[in-house]
């Protein structure tokens, strides 16, 4: 029977990163993956293909809206949807192939197939059983369903995010159920491709965990880009024909019932942890009320030698959170001090403009009754943003009123997903807005807006 120090089940960003780190730390490591390619949800049907489609359709938007202004004349490009999907698939393939290369380079064995844990210290894949001193559950998540909406990605009328990444054609009318990150990103893609997109959301705001000002701004900007929003609406169900759907929803404010016609309904109401078939119940592994694996501060379950990370456990369902846990648990197993700072995990929405946030929002601090300062700077005052038609949005930094220590930051604007990281690093070091403001920032860059927001926490910004 093959023996390992560590077997990881699942090769998403949590599992594959953990496998590489385990191997780097000298542990004999295998990773079990049932999919035909490595990389999990993120690389195959999540972060990467969605960003490829967002990139391609953003180029189309630029060509249609901004090229002529810059003196770039000529016909706007037409859309070859099959070619766009082929490009997306090439991007996926090169990334998943890259992980296979990294496994070989680091001598991680890929055990192909779906695994279960018949008893602590053993992993079964097909007819083979492998021994492992440590087992890491990194089986991720799958789209959550909504009663009354039966997902059928093959049929392509009521689909989840996986189906939405691979529609046979661009729909004329699309309804997106759920105004979270995935719904808004995929809605943006199809709106740019010419679909009439309507987002139906149960809550009264979009992106519920984001700063209130960001929510309002993003909704306004996306509306200008052609997306419609129906908020405070409870979806009741949908009837489908061979080619269309009729979605019924009730407005919460007056209980009135309404209907929407669509060629495609995308159900984007969240994801649920996936641990089916692992045998965790029989093994006695405790789960939380939310149906995720219960772990302690070191990602250990209540069963000795069994750990869990990523979307399968509590916390934000984000690839980089899974990766950080993957590295940290490897270090814990190797006898080192693995660490994840859950207070400094950025979240990003890759619409245009991008939205990024880290730490506390103003609403959260108000609730906590904590005294804070706000420094805000609009991209209208940023020369680079103006030059590239990206001056919508702002940087908002929130600091402790007494100490000036940064407590949170929200950015809506160009490259927000990259800009947020200098705030993350400052927060990681317990830094203040003044620390950021005193750091020289190259001109002309979008990052100057972050510095100006930091200056706004003190004596004031220069360009506003
Ligand atoms: P997963 O990536 O879900 O990987 C788990 C793997 O385990 C899967 O490959 C599965 O096949 C395998 N598996 C499950 N059970 C078994 C078994 N018994 N045996 C063997 N293998 C098994 N996050 C971001 O941070 N940024 C983004 O931009 C972003 N965009 C997204 C866009 C979309 C459309 C979607 C759907 C998600 C997006 N996410 C994004 C979320 C991100 O994909 C997840 O948070 C991340 O993939 C979680 O990683 P994981 O390793 O925990 O699990």
Image (tube, rainbow, N blue to C red):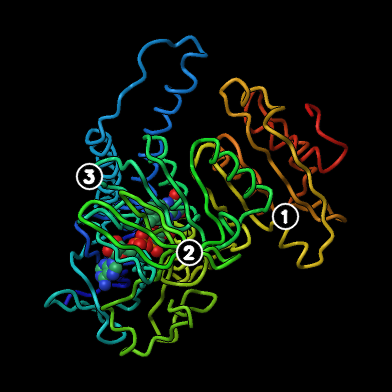
Compare marks 2 and 3 and give the one earlier in the sequence.
3
Q: Quadrant of residue 91?
A: top left
The residue wearing badge 1 is 430
Q: Which mark is residue 257?
A: 2
Neighbour class for label 1 at 10 Å: few (<14), some, many (≥20)?
few
Residue drawn at x 35%, y 14% as measured from the top left = 75
Q: Is residue 273 left or right of residue 107?
A: right
Q: Is residue 162 left or right of residue 370?
A: left
Report the image quarter containing ligand 1.
bottom left
Separation (CA) of disc 3 from disc 1: 49 Å
Count neighbours of disc 3 (C-alpha within 10 A) and say few if under 14, some if 14 to 19, many if 20 or more: some
Q: Are marks 1 and 2 in contact (CB under 8 Å)?
A: no
Pick the front one: 142 or 406 = 142
Assess mark 2: CB under 8 A from ligand 1? no
Mark 3: C-beta under 8 Å from nearest atom of ligand 1: no
Q: Residues within 10 Å of mark 2 (few under 14, many from 20)?
A: some
Secondary structure beneath dot 3 equals loop
Task: Name the mark nearer the viewer: 2 or 3.
Answer: 2
The disc at residue 332 is none
Disc 2 to disc 3, C-alpha distance = 31 Å
The quarter of the displayed image where residue 210 is located: bottom right
Residue 337: percent from the left, percent from the top? 54, 68
Q: Dot 3 corresponds to which residue?
A: 168
Going by the image, does 123 lie left or right of 455?
left
- Where is residue 371? Give x, y as percent: 84, 60
Q: Residue at x 75, y 51 (%)?
A: 398
Residue at the (69%, 56%) spot, across then down:
361
State the residue lying farthest toward the left: 127
Residue 370, above or below 452 = below
Q: Earlier in the sequence, mark 3 or mark 1?
A: 3
Looking at the rendered image, the disc whose residue lies closer to the viewer, 1 or 2, is: 2
């Amino acid at each position: 029977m093959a023996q390992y120090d560590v077997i990881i089940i699942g090769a998403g960003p949590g599992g594959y990163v953990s496998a590489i780190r385990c191997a780097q730390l000298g542990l004999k490591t295998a990773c079990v993956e049932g999919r035909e390619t490595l990389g999990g949800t993120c690389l195959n049907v999540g972060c990467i293909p969605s960003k490829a489609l967002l990139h391609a359709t953003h180029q189309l938007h630029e060509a249609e809206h901004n090229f002529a202004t810059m003196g770039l004349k000529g016909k706007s490009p037409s859309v070859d949807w099959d070619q766009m999907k082929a490009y997306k698939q090439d991007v996926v393939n090169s990334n998943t192939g890259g992980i296979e290369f990294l496994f070989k380079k680091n001598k991680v064995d890929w055990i192909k197939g779906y695994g279960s844990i018949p008893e602590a210290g053993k992993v079964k894949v097909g007819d083979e059983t492998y021994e492992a001193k440590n087992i890491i559950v990194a089986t991720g998540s799958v789209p959550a369903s909504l009663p009354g909406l039966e997902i059928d990605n093959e049929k392509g009328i009521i689909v989840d995010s996986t189906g939405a990444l691979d529609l046979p054609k661009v729909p004329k009318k699309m309804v997106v159920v759920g105004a979270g990150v995935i719904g808004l990103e995929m809605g943006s893609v199809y709106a740019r491709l010419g679909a009439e997109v309507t987002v139906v959301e149960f809550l009264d705001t979009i992106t519920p965990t984001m700063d209130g000002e960001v929510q309002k701004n993003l909704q306004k900007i996306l509306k200008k880009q052609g997306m419609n929003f129906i908020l405070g609406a409870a979806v009741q169900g949908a009837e489908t024909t061979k080619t269309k759907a009729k979605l019924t929803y009730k407005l919460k404010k007056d209980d009135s019932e309404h209907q929407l016609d669509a060629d495609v309904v995308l159900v984007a109401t969240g994801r649920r942890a996936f641990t089916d078939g692992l045998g965790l119940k029989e093994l006695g592994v405790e789960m939380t009320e939310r149906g995720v694996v219960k772990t302690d501060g070191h990602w250990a379950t209540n069963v000795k030698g069994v750990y869990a990370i990523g979307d399968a456990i509590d916390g934000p369902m984000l690839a980089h959170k899974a990766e950080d846990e993957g590295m940290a648990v490897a270090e814990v197993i190797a006898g080192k001090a693995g660490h994840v700072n859950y207070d400094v995990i950025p979240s990003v929405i890759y619409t245009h403009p991008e939205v990024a946030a880290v730490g506390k929002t103003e609403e959260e601090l108000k609730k906590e009754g904590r005294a804070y300062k706000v420094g805000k700077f609009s991209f209208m005052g940023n020369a680079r943003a103006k030059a590239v038609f990206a001056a919508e949005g702002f940087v908002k930094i929130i600091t402790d009123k007494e100490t000036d220590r940064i407590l949170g930051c929200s950015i809506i604007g160009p490259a927000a997903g990259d800009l947020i990281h200098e705030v993350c690093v400052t927060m990681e070091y317990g830094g203040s807005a003044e620390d950021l403001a005193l750091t020289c920032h190259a001109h002309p860059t979008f990052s100057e807006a972050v510095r100006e927001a930091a200056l706004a926490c003190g004596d004031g910004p220069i360009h506003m």
